[in-house]
Image (cartoon, rainbow, N blue to C red):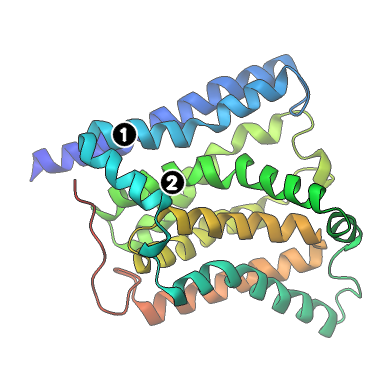
């Protein structure tokens, strides 16, 4: 028992040291030099740093599971058949639907007459090339490289030691702290008008991690589903340029719905059948 626990600790800390160490090293250079995040040469180090979770997920999958671990990761990354149709619907529609409810509440409660600035969305819709480039940017900047690590490796290792709800929150905390250097990076949040409000940002990551696990455990451990869900979360907020009031209400709804999910699907596995899919290694 002690040997298994020690191995699990090494798996967890090995991944975190790799993902955070790699990312913070390259991002630390950008912060220390004062380079602009999206200008050369800062953007090179920004992109290199952003690969930390992905590389950590690949390296640790091989270190823990060997070729079987890599095959398992690859299959979960590319096979859409792992995800039942109803869970694809949840994956794609959950965040847009919750955002629409938040916008409706903002208007209905008189908090704001404009829950989102749609000017940028109209411009993107008028140019298919720009819309495609924007979608690709959103996908590559976060969802694709990050989820190979957070859900592709770390979540499984956490769920071997803790229940699904606790594991979700721990992965969320790791994910949150990983972002820390970006707040000190010149120009990273310039397009958004400055860094996000810390509490909303934390809720959007830590509490949202419950939804990732909920989908993941009901979708045969699909990393592809996690990537798509991450994409819908980032794309929805950036495409519609949500007002601060809408983001605040959205964060409140995240907490409420997360509590409902845990209560109805059960905190142990976030599945109604009382089981969860296990990694083969």
Question: Which residue occupies the extreme front position in the image?
Answer: 128
Residue positioned 77% across, 68% down in the render:
246
Residue 85 percent across, percent down from the top left: 45, 74
Residue positioned 77% across, 28% down in the render:
186
Q: Which mark is residue 29?
A: none
Looking at the image, residue 269 lies above or below residue 173: below
Which of the two labelled residues, at mark 2 and mark 1, occupies the earlier sequence position?
A: 1
Relative horizontal placement of residue 194, taking residue 280 as reference (left or right): right
Q: CA distance from mark 2 to mark 1?
A: 12 Å
Residue 2 percent across, percent down from the top left: 10, 41
**Mark 2: few, some, or many residues within 10 Å (few <14, many ≥20)?**
many
Question: Which residue occupies the extreme bottom position in the image?
Answer: 108
Looking at the rendered image, the quarter that the C terminus falls into is top left
Q: Are marks 2 and 1 in contact (CB under 8 Å)?
A: no
Q: How many marks?
A: 2
Residue 27 percent across, percent down from the top left: 61, 24
Looking at the image, residue 169 lies above or below residue 30: below
Residue positioned 54% across, 57% down in the render:
228
Residue 76 percent across, percent down from the top left: 36, 52
Task: Residue 218: name its quadrant.
Answer: bottom left
Q: Which residue is mark 2?
A: 150
Relative horizontal placement of residue 130, taking residue 20 as reference (left or right): right
Of 58 and 201, the residue lying toward us: 58
Looking at the image, residue 1 lies above or below residue 210: above
Task: Residue 94: name its quadrant.
Answer: bottom right
Q: Which mark is residue 60?
A: 1
Relative horizontal placement of residue 214, taking residue 27 as reference (left or right): left
């Amino acid at each position: 028992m002690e040997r298994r626990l020690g191995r699990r600790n090494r798996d967890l800390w090995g991944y975190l040291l790799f993902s955070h160490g790699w990312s913070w090293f390259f991002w630390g250079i950008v912060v220390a030099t004062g380079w602009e995040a999206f200008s050369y040469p800062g953007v090179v180090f920004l992109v290199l740093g952003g690969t930390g979770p992905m590389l950590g997920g690949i390296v640790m999958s091989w270190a823990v599971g060997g070729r079987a671990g890599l095959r398992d990761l690859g299959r979960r990354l590319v096979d859409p058949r792992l995800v039942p149709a109803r869970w694809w619907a949840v994956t794609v529609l959950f965040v847009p639907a919750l955002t629409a409810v938040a916008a409706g509440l903002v208007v209905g409660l008189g908090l704001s007459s404009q829950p989102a600035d749609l000017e940028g969305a109209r411009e993107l819709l008028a140019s298919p090339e720009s819309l495609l480039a924007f979608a690709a940017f959103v996908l590559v900047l976060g969802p694709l490289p990050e989820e190979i690590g957070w859900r592709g490796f770390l979540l499984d290792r956490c769920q071997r030691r803790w229940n699904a709800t606790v594991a979700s929150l721990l992965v969320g905390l790791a994910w949150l702290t990983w972002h820390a250097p970006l707040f000190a990076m010149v120009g990273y949040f310039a397009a958004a008008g400055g860094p996000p409000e810390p509490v909303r940002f934390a809720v959007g990551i830590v509490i949202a991690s419950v939804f990732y696990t909920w989908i993941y455990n009901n979708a045969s451990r699909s990393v592809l589903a996690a990537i798509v869900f991450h994409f819908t979360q980032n794309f929805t907020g950036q495409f519609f340029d949500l007002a601060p009031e809408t983001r605040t209400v959205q964060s409140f709804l995240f907490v409420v719905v997360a509590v409902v999910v845990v209560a109805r699907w059960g905190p142990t596995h976030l599945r109604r059948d009382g089981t969860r899919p296990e990694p083969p290694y």
